[in-house]
Image (cartoon, grey):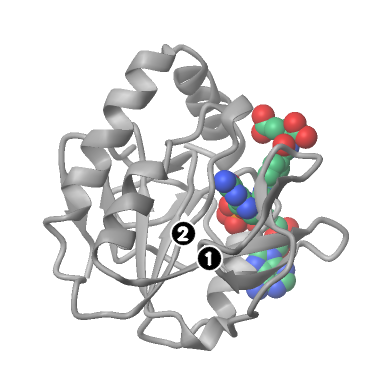
Amino acid sequence: MLKKDLRIAFKKKREALSLAEIDEKSLAIANQVLQLQLWEYSFFHLFLSIERLKEINTEYLLHILNGKDKNIVVSKSEFEALTMKHFLLTDATPLKLNKWGIPEPVNGIEIPATQLDVVFIPLLAFDEKGNRIGYGKGFYDRFLNECKEDVIKVGLSFFEATTTIEDTNANDIPLDFCVTPEKIYRFN
Ligand SMILES: Nc1nc2c(c(=O)[nH]1)N(C=O)[C@@H](CNc1ccc(C(=O)N[C@@H](CCC(=O)O)C(=O)O)cc1)CN2
Ligand SMILES: Nc1ncnc2c1ncn2[C@@H]1O[C@H](COP(=O)(O)OP(=O)(O)OP(=O)(O)O)[C@@H](O)[C@H]1O
């Protein structure tokens, strides 16, 4: 299927989820992440959920990372440039909702993308080869392009893989793993 049709289809599937289902599936995803062999790494980038778009609630994963004393990095989006800046999340990091409803750090210790070991990636849909699509602005394609070559890219999804995303291009950086409430896909 084409990206534009997948976006429509998967936005509908998400909209149909109840808040209780979102909560239950988000917890199941966080528990699956525990199974990944990631725990030797230090710097973990996490997205903070846009509630109005019924994204995965990443608070469960945040608690796990905290419990393991990992360095947690979150971003501030620049919608004019379609780029992100990254900041260490500490107890002292104030968060504020931006106008798209994304919780963001107001300021803090900036972390270069090259320092990240693991990036958890929001998505609308992914396929059996590890291709993914988001909202179509290319924020993550640009961001991942700045990370080190061997950064571990972990998609998080409520739904299972779709067969193929037909219109992938040279900017699309595939996932290494995708975690759903039911299973873990490994692509490399
Ligand atoms: N939690 C989270 N943070 C993220 C992303 C994400 O997907 N999830 N992004 C990943 O790249 C970037 C932000 N991308 C965004 C792109 C569009 C809209 C948005 O609200 N767009 C339209 C239409 C919404 C829709 O698709 O239904 C709107 O204004 O309502 C929000 C965030 C960076 N941070
Ligand atoms: N590294 C890059 N440099 C410049 N432009 C890019 C880069 N990566 C992607 N883009 C542009 O961003 C736009 C969105 O790309 P695409 O359709 O793949 O979105 P997406 O993967 O759904 O988005 P997102 O990364 O926000 O989840 C495209 O116009 C693409 O050309």
Dot 2: what SS?
loop
Residue 125 in the image: state x and y as whole percent.
Answer: 44, 40
Picture coordinates of residue 64, whole percent (x, y): 27, 54
- The residue singled out by tag 2 in the image is 46
Where residue 136 appears, as percent x and y from the top left, is 66, 47
Marks 2 & 1, CB-CB < 8 Å contact? yes
Which amino acid type corresponds to the residue marked 2 in the rendered image?
Answer: Leu
Which three-letter amino acid code belongs to the residue tagged 1? Leu
N-terminal of the pair, mark 2 or mark 1, is 2
Which quadrant of the structure image shows residue 92?
bottom right
Q: Mark 1 sits on what residue?
A: 89
Q: Residues within 10 Å of mark 2 (few under 14, many from 20)?
A: many
Extreme residue toward the front, this view: 92
Please state which of the two labelled residues, at mark 2 or mark 1, is closer to the viewer: 1
Residue 166 pos. (x, y %): 47, 48
Residue depicted at x 46% and y 59%: 46
